[in-house]
Amino acid sequence: MTRPDPLPWLLEPDNPSARYLTLTDVLDRPAGDREVEMARRAIPAQGPARAILDAQWPAGYWMRPGVGYSPKYKATVWQILFLAALGTPRTEALDRVCAYVLDHSRLPDGRFSAHKTAKGATTCLNGNLLRAFFRLDYRDPRLEGSLEALVEMVASDRFCCRFNALRPLPTSMGDGLPCAWGAVKALAAFAEIPEQQRSSSVRRAIRHGVSFLLEGNLALGDYPTATGPSPFWHRLGFPLGYRSDLVEALEVLGRMGVGHSPALVEALRFVEEKRDPEGRWQLEHTLPNTWATFGQVNQPNKWVTIRALRALRYWA
């Protein structure tokens, strides 16, 4: 039996973020479409986006001035990630936080860091922030340098991360193990660049990322790690923060044009089997200590359902 269509539920007007993302990312409605524009304009005034923006200081930061990575997940850097994931439109408040992060979380060499030094310049953070800036359609010439810096990180470290290592942690990123989360986040940023605008170095970085993800067992998530595969790889959530999961990996591989492969069948089946009888997916985990709530755990969730549909569409 075919499952019910979740689209009427996703398009309900009480959640303009889910409605906007469904119209654009699932139904491919173009920018400028009347329903798309109406839904997006309503996002900042309701739900999680409003709760987040209400906590912003006038200067553009959250919690306290500075780099803005700590505390998780209430500091400044996280809010730009969450607001972008919700589909929030450009507003004065959004422009303030974008400028603030570029002014305070970016190193002179273009990399974003969780600290004031390069020790906090992880691939996942840089991929996450660049994707957020691109999705928010924020323009600043410094972003070109940050994109080049991410490409260089991929070329030099091949997704190795000092935080993916046994303690005591090494000082160099290249001395850690290669991280699937970092590969997914970097690919997600590169995917926001129109294919015809990707430089040869970006294309090369994409090939590295795709190759790395396909070398492992995507369904199992058995990528190099000091502690064993993360349980979050199989627990679908929203928002994700610095973690990644199977759905995000499938989506970026699909966006990069990876075709059907026997290696992906098990992963696709795993995601499909999480769909409930109503055609929806549950929120299996969410981040703690946030300004907003994103749904009840173990209940059907619109954002998780959109994420799953967005990924599976490439393999239909």
Image: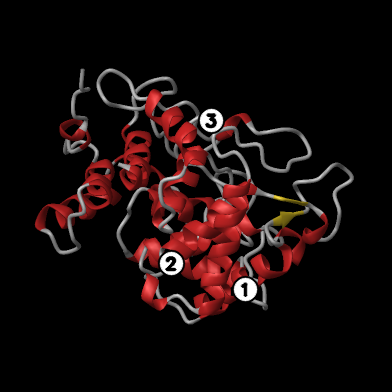
Residue matched to label 1: 149
Quarter of the image that includes the N terminus: top left
Q: What separation in Å lies between label 3 and label 1 (alpha carbons)?
A: 30 Å
Give the class, few, some or many, for how many residues have Cα within 10 Å of label 1's Cα (few <14, many ≥20).
some
Q: Give coordinates of residue 29: x percent, y percent.
A: 17, 55
Left or right: 310 as drawn, with respect to 228:
left
Q: What separation in Å lies between label 2 and label 1 (alpha carbons)?
A: 23 Å
For discs 3 and 2, the disc positioned in front in the rendered view: 3
Q: Give coordinates of residue 168: x percent, y percent.
A: 89, 45
- Give yes or no for contact between labels 3 and 1 (Cβ–Cβ under 8 Å): no
> At 51% across and 75% down in the image, what residue appears?
143
Residue matched to label 2: 96
Q: What separation in Å lies between label 3 and label 2 (alpha carbons)?
A: 35 Å
Residue matched to label 3: 234
- Give yes or no for contact between labels 3 and 2 (Cβ–Cβ under 8 Å): no
The answer to which of 179 and 121 lies nearer the viewer is 179
Q: What residue type is labelled 3?
A: His
| Count of number-bearing discs | 3
Q: Which amino acid does label 1 sit on?
A: Ala
Quarter of the image that includes the C terminus: top left
SS of the residue under disc 3: loop
Q: Of marks 2 and 1, which one's residue comes earlier in the chain? A: 2
> At 73% across and 63% down in the image, what residue appears?
157
> Does residue 102 show up?
yes
> At 44% across and 37% down in the image, what residue appears?
238
Q: Give coordinates of residue 88: x percent, y percent.
A: 32, 54
* Vertical order, 249 against 206 (above or below): above
Task: Locate residue 161: give its quadrant.
Answer: bottom right
SS of the residue under disc 1: helix
> Does residue 237 show up?
no
Q: Of marks 3 and 2, which one's residue comes earlier in the chain? A: 2
Q: Give coordinates of residue 151: x percent, y percent.
A: 60, 71
